[in-house]
Image (cartoon, helix red, strand yellow):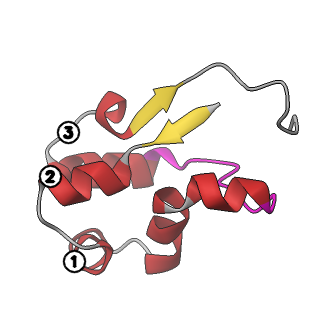
Amino acid sequence: MIVFKLADLLDQRQMTMYQLSKKTGIRPNTLSQWVNNDKLREEDKHVKAISVEVLNLICQVLDCTPGDLLEYTPDDHNTKSP
């Protein structure tokens, strides 16, 4: 499964989701999904697709790479498959 590390990066950069939204033009709801993806997964409302454009904008503003934002961990067998 893909783990989003956006919340950690925002903390490191001392930036809020609102500030990131203003700088990138990305809807706050989209950013909130990235930050809260683990909780949303339990309700099957997790992020199902990632726009390359959104990923690029976040990387530009936070001066990071996609690897700083995303991490792959093997799926737990107790989770639902897509």
- Measured Cα–Cα span from mark 1 to mark 3: 16 Å
Rendered residue at 65%/19% (across/down): 74
Rendered residue at 25%/70% (across/down): 20
Give the amino acid at mark 2: Gln
Residue 50 lies, in percent from the top left, at 56, 47
User: What range of the chain is rendered magenta?
Assistant: 43-52
Instruction: Kindly indicate whether the residue at mark 2 contacts the one at mark 1 (C-beta within 8 angstroms).
Output: no
Name above or below for residue 36 compared with residue 71: below
Name above or below for residue 9 compared with residue 31: above
Image position of 40 (left or right of 66):
right
Instruction: Kindly indicate whether the residue at mark 3 contacts the one at mark 1 (C-beta within 8 angstroms).
Output: no
Q: Secondary structure at mark 2?
A: helix
Name above or below for residue 76 compared with residue 13: above
Q: Is residue 49 magenta?
A: yes
Give the amino acid at mark 3: Cys
Name above or below for residue 67 compared with residue 15: above
Q: Which tag, 3 or 2, sits closer to the chain's start?
A: 2
Residue beneath disc 3 = 64
Residue beneath disc 2 = 12
Image position of 11 (left or right of 55):
left
Rendered residue at 55%/64% (across/down): 33
Give the amino acid at mark 1: Gln
Residue beneath disc 1 = 19
Q: Which tag, 1 or 2, sits closer to the chain's start?
A: 2
- Measured Cα–Cα span from mark 1 to mark 2: 14 Å
